[in-house]
Image (cartoon, rainbow, N blue to C red):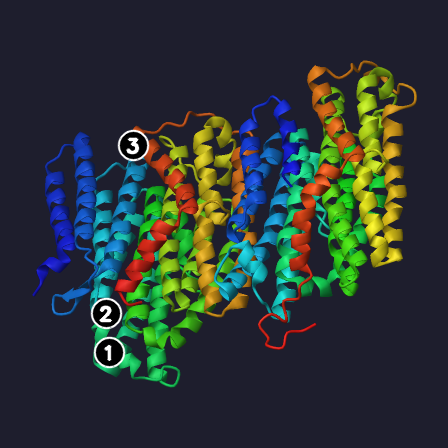
Amino acid sequence: MIVVIAGWEVITYRVSQYMAAFLIMGGIVNGVFAALDAMLFYILFEAMLIPLFLIIGIWGGARRVYATIKFFLYTFFGSVFLLISLIYLYQLGGSFAVADLHKLPIEKTPQILIFLSFLLAFGVKVPMWPVHTWLPDAHVEAPTGGSVVLAAITLKVGGYAFLRFALPIVPDAAAQLDWLVILMSLTAVVYIGFVALVQQDMKKLVAYSSIAHMGFVTLAFFMVYSMATALKDPAAMGSAVLALQGGMVQMVSHGFISGAMFLCIGVLYDRMHTRDINAYGGVANRMPTFAALYVLFAMANTGLPGTSGFVGEFMVILASFRASPWIAFTAATTLIVGAAYTLWLVKRVLFGDVKNAEVAELHDIGRREFWMLSILAAAVLLLGLWPQPLTDVMEVSIENLLAHALQSKLCIGFAGGCL
Amino acid sequence: MNIAIAMPEIFLLSTICLILLIDVFLREDCRMVSYLLTQVAVLATALLAYGAMDGNKTTGLNGMYVSDDLAGVLKISILLLTFGVFVYARKYLKDQNIWQSEFFLLALFAVLGMLIMVSANHLLVVYLGLELLALSMYALVAFNRDDGRSSEAAMKYFVLGAVASGLLLYGISILYGLSGKLELTEVLAYVSAQNVLENIPLLFALVFIVAGISFKFGAVPFHMWVPDVYQGAPTAVTMFLGSVPKVAALAMLLRVLAESMGTAQAGWAQLLLVFGLLSVFLGNFVAIAQLNLKRMLAYSTIAHMGFILLGAMTGTTDGYSAALFYTITYAMMAAGGFAILILLGREGFEAETLDDLKGLNERNPWYAFVMMVFLFSMAGIPPTVGFYAKLSIIQAVMQAGYLWPAVFMVLMSVIGAYYYLRAIKMMYFDKPEQDAPIKADLDFTVLISVNGVLMVLLGLFPSALMGICSAAMVTSHL
């Protein structure tokens, strides 16, 4: 997961006065991923809201106040239930250490309640359909740097938390309610994909595509349970590992890609001061270098082989065949819809004739912008062509995680045990 | 007779008389001397109270007075808070042209009343302390005597306060009629022998006593006075009223309900549960509609008092310590919040609407940051201390088996977060409407900075203060 954090280096290229807020943010995010104590995790999870609230609110767009308060209250609402669950767990086990919580035996009904509260807290953060509505608002109003952090990092916290908390602590509830999450994820993937298609605002479009991609991630995490019915079968186990790996690769790559997409939009916005797609056209004629990079990221966003977007999506879809061909089929439609909205965006913005006088006056990206985008481009390509180092790092922890996540907790503590 | 047991109170009373005398002979432009003497008296009393803490529980003055660690902790927090409030108040009194030493003397009498409440081991002594506190407060609220709203607030406070005192006294007299006892330990012996839920007269007495205590807290349904008094009183008095007496109110709750009727917890816990939940609900919802910052903070106080009552309601050591921790830290936040209001005021101008906060970040980033810390702390967002206080209360409530009230409490915190966020929005996202420079003396600036930093430090390292709170509960056998 450390790789994800690397995403925030991007912001250091933005020379402006909100560095302090970003530094605090960066520190807190590092802490969130490193926390092994549930209460510490919660504190950092919440503390993350404060700098982001200010970043969006102070340096954001016209409707920033509405967006930032909506963002804050949504996330806060979700996470207070997390707090209640954590206190409940503490009273059961007398410890906030995550490792102890993994071993804690819990009855079925509490497990389901705890799972639902986890789902609410992390689902809002991810965000999953239908609690995603804060994200487009927050993205649209946030300054470019804010959008990048939001897309590249904070969304990942939700996904990470599912792996760290929801799956291992309440495995039985997760197994029982996996259909709910899968349904929500598929809705996100398909429905939000179509929503993205009709957006007029570039940032909104990328924001919706983020939701769709994160739907993939949650889908991958929860498919594990449908495969696990044949736990003894090594092939099933293999594809469960594949699904989780795919989900994590998807998270990392989405961090790079969506961050890059937002930076690109920021580059355009700095010049034109509008995000309306209709105001652009033929940008490639004036900004060839920029256009090349932009197309690369767009392709990665659609999941073109050779880019990191492909690796994650392909692993997830491959694994999902094991769970159910229908899930795989539905999930795969995103490749079409995703290609549709991304390529259409690229077509309308970059290609065609130079549309108006403002576009005609555009000048190409400078050295600073070039390097900040090309580092990301290199990462996207590297991950796409040679993902093995990343998956190797993940493999051990995933197998460890699966051991916890698939082990039913209901039988621990009963003399006879269960099968 | 062991007079030494009341040493801090005796010392404070003598110095009050001394300052009164000195003040008579001071010229108008030497008021600073009485101010400094007041501050020295407060600190010296705090030292005496600290010296009296020896980990034992001793009673004296014919069993009417008690000295234990709980009393020590409460007294020291009352006195230190008072010290801070006085530093903040000085700027306000000078700005508003009411720089008179009566403010400090009346406040000292109120503090004396509070110290007596804290150490009382006898129901009548509790009542005496309460009345000394209340009478000084009535006069303080009307301190700005040319201001109609101030007098109106004082009148309202006085009438309602008198009714509440009557209720409390009536409850005490029923209890006396039943048991023939007034000393807290003897009352405990009587109550322990009864089956509370079957004994209707005893329940009657309990209801009246709880009503009287809830009035002091300003908990729903005895909250009517809070918004009007907060708004009408001069801001310095509001700050005093909104912070220090809350500690004394908790002391009264701990002494009267927890200590002398702890075995009747089943009887009063339900009342406190309902009052607490109603306060959290009403305080947070009504605060949203307020445009006057003082009124908004008044409703937010109601909500916070609900949390404290809910913590005390559990009847466990954890619950009491959490309530104590919450009260002390809340008093610090409230004092700081009102201090920022004072800071924004200047000669002939009083800041009290939300609009006055607009653009504070552009006018002075550091004060804006400190105010943001206070507001986030009141909203209970980590890593500020407000989060830890709420956490420990909720934990105690859940420990006692009240899962749904706990869920209700966190939901209400989300609603509460909205109006704090709105205030932060005003400070950070809006343009300033006035650009008068913000001036403050060095002592004010230093104290408000320390106050703000403490909110974060205590949030990150709460265990020291929490340890003191629970140790105090243990020596008092709560």
For mark 2, name the chain.
B
Circles 2 and 1: CB atoms closer than 8 Å: yes
Which amino acid, by three-letter code, is at mark 2? Leu
Point 56% across, 27% down: residue: A19
Question: Element under label 2?
Answer: helix
Query: Disc 3 to disc 2, how far (Cα)?
Result: 40 Å
Which amino acid, by three-letter code, is at mark 3? Asp
Residue toward you, B230 or A211? A211
Which residue is under mark 1?
B176
Residue B247 is situated, as x and y percent measured from the top left of the image, at: 32, 55
Q: Do labels 2 and 1 share a chain?
A: yes
Question: Element under label 1?
Answer: helix
Which residue is under mark 3?
B443
Seen in the image, is A213 located left or right of residue A81? right
How many marks overall?
3
Residue A44 falls in image quadrant: top right
Seen in the image, is A120 located left or right of residue B364? right
The mark nearer the N terminus, 3 or 2, is 2
Residue toward you, A10 or A231? A231
Which residue is under mark 2?
B123
For mark 3, name the chain.
B
Residue B89 is situated, as x and y percent measured from the top left of the image, at: 30, 39
Q: In this view, does B189 lie above or below B12?
A: below
